[in-house]
Amino acid sequence: RGCPYRCQFCSTSVFWGARYRMRSVDNVIREIEQLINEGIEDIEILDDALTVKKTWIVALCNEIKKRKLKFDWTATTRANYIDEEICNAMKRAGCRRVILGIESFSDKILKQIHKGINSDQAVGAIRLAQKAGLKACCLLMVGNPGETWDTINDSIKAIKASRPDSLTINPVQVYPQTELYELAKQGGLVGDSYWLDESRA
């Protein structure tokens, strides 16, 4: 649970704080085995950043191989938390797709939202994943504070250059208690009363 970063738009750190709590490799493996025994063949691991701790993710992959567990799986992580060894280990363990929370390929926007990466790292992560034989999916946002046609075009150019296997592009969503929410409140764009209006239930 959690993520060690505090991106401007993200509610994860609001819920869990800026920390990342991990289950043991054995605990995760036992749950995977249970799912396989129930006939599950495809698993999506929904951590915000599965590969934060390199020793942990490599150990998980090695254990999957050691136990000869046969299933397809997908992982979500950050562009600055993968390298060649991690990608190769995941591929050998049956991972077929890595979802990268990139948000934007504009360095201006990445800095604005406190993403903690730059566009070169984002492009590099796509190439590392694909080199290992993984499909690279990018999660992108449009409409963060400071967004312009120039910053959007920065992302379009990087997408054309890096050629990820798939994209998910969403407009910015504002969640309570995030930094982005406070900015929206200051600008008169949203108020706390929105969440208390029972007619919206």
Image: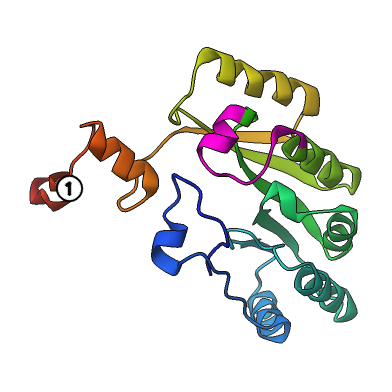
148 relative position to 185: left or right: right
Give coordinates of residue 192: x percent, y percent.
17, 48
Q: Quadrant of residue 22?
A: bottom right
SS of the residue at dot 1? loop
Against 31, is 18 above or below? above
**Considering depth in this image, is 75 or 102 the residue closer to the camera?**
102
Give coordinates of residue 162: x percent, y percent.
79, 29
Against 74, is 141 above or below? above
Residue at the image point whose x is 46% and y is 67% from the top: 17
**Considering depth in this image, is 24 or 134 the residue closer to the camera?**
24
Specify whether residue 113 is painted magenta. yes
Specify whether residue 80 is painted magenta. no
Q: Quadrant of residue 41?
A: bottom right
Give coordinates of residue 114: x percent, y percent.
54, 44
56 relative position to 130: left or right: left
What amino acid does circle 1 point to? Answer: Asp
Against 108, is 83 above or below? below
143 relative position to 29: left or right: left
Dot 1 crowding, Cα within 10 Å, few <14, some 14–19, many 20+: few
Region of the chain picked out in magenta, as a range: 108-120
**Considering depth in this image, is 133 or 36 the residue closer to the camera?**
133
Residue at the image point whose x is 68% and y is 35% from the top: 166
Residue lying furthest top in this view? 149
Identify the residue position indicated by label 1 in the image. 192
Give coordinates of residue 102: x percent, y percent.
63, 40
